[in-house]
Amino acid sequence: MSYFIDRRRNARHKSAVNRQRFIRRYRKHIKRSVEEAINRRSITDIERGEKVSIPGRDISEPVFRHGNSGRRTIVSPGNREFVEGDRLRRPGGRGGGSGSGEGNASRQGEGVDEFAFTLSREEFLGFIFDGLELPHLVRKQLAEVEEQRPVRAGVSRQGVPARMNIVRSMREAQARRIAMRAPIKRALLEAQQALEEEERKDPVLRNPQCIRELKEEIARLERRLAAVPFIDTYDLRYNNLIDQPQPSNRAVMFCVMDVSGSMTQNHKDIAKRFFLLLYLFLEREYERVELVFIRHHTAAREVDEEEFFYSRETGGTIVSSALDLLSQVIAERYPPAQWNLYVAQASDGDNWDDDSIRCRELLEQTLMPQLQYYAYVEITPHAHQALWEEYERVQARFEERFAMRRIVEPGDIYPVFRELFRSREEGSGA
């Protein structure tokens, strides 16, 4: 029989095992609350935990109570007002109902007590990305990285007390004591045997001088045995640690957005929510994630996050300028053999008709062979235009690595995100 002991540290008055069991049992309620929180939260609050409420009726558990069987003795106080069978009037309340509580009764039916439960950041993000996976997730060969981690590399004779290896030190001390005491014990045994032989001789033949020398030798050898230390500084061994480079999976996420006059601030806020969800998702899959922001109207430019989302531009739209700049940045800074490349593009669908064909050619011939995934979201309630039609041809060719969806309002972001990155098992079973 095997026993598994959970030694994870728990917070005060909390149990990690019970908490996981509770989350598994009420997963349906918690998942619904997480999906509602995604739609109502601001961008900066996406990473914190969430407080969810579970109806009290759903957390009830069976309990054991004592029955009425057996002999019982009960002493009840008497009264002069009531006898068996009398009906008691319900006490009046101060609110609108007949109970004793404060406030008015609900007009929506029977009230239900709720149990409040707080999810941690990791648990909250776990429910956000539950059932999702990054398509075409490939581990690339990495170049040298700066991250290093100390790892065990045997033992050494020098070190700090905190790294002392007790077992190895005691083993070395025992080996040293055996090696040092063995010849002394052998000489002591020989001296004791010689003394016994000399003392067994006839008193006339005994040599008092020899007996005295043997006794002095035995005493000297016993002092030498006692002088052998139990442990010596020579015996001490320390765990040796060396810095070993740790390979880490790296990814870069390109955020491409149209900032022409037709893109309002509301469109940009919706795009930012989608970009943030994808970035958080990538962070769970890769140890290092870099962001590159490319904005475009008639010309494309790489900018920082603040300018990417809040700077205003006017004019028309040429999407191919952003794709050209994207290809240039990849060639200069992010070799596909060393980086996992992801692109998320947000637009309202406007583009010069002649430029949409060039966008398709750039994607099919240059970008898609290098990318892990390309996600395009069109933020518009109107009919699709030429850019959408050309992208559909790209999707037909790179079905597993190119996805496109339309978003109308903020509430559509999370469902579209789940649809874009749902796991293959979930997709095949649908």
Image (cartoon, rainbow, N blue to C red):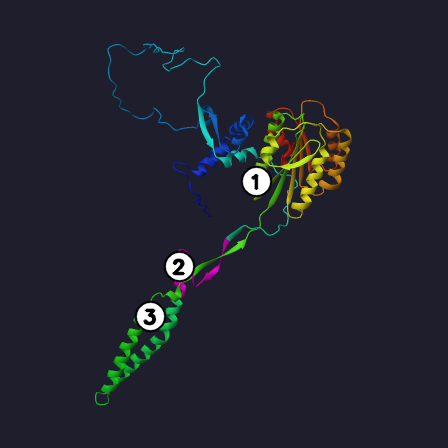
Q: Which one is in front, 186 or 61? A: 186
Say if mark 1 contacts mark 3, CB within 8 Å: no
The span picked out in magenta is 150-173
Which residue is label 3 attached to? Answer: 228
Say if mark 2 contacts mark 3, CB within 8 Å: no
What is the C-alpha distance between the residues marked 2 and 3? Answer: 20 Å
- Mark 2 or mark 3, earlier in chain: 2
Residue at image position (44%, 22%) is 113
> Taking the image as drawn, is residue 199 in sight?
no
Q: Position of residue 68 (x, y in %)?
A: 34, 24
Q: Amino acid at mark 3?
A: Val
Label 2 SS: helix
Apparent side of residue 397 relative to residue 420 in the rendered image (left or right): right
Q: Which one is in front, 322 or 362? A: 322
- Mark 1 or mark 3, earlier in chain: 3
Frontmost of labels 1 and 2 is 1
Label 2 CA crowd tier, 10 Å (few <14, some 14–19, many 20+): few
- Mark 1 or mark 2, earlier in chain: 2
Q: Is residue 156 magenta?
A: yes
Apparent side of residue 316 relative to residue 156 in the rendered image (left or right): right
Which residue is label 1 attached to? Answer: 283
Q: Amino acid at mark 2?
A: Ile
What is the C-alpha distance between the residues marked 1 and 2? Answer: 40 Å
Q: Position of residue 261 (x, y in %)?
A: 67, 26
Which residue is label 2 attached to? Answer: 166
Residue at image position (31%, 74%) is 224
Q: Is residue 136 above or below residue 274?
A: below
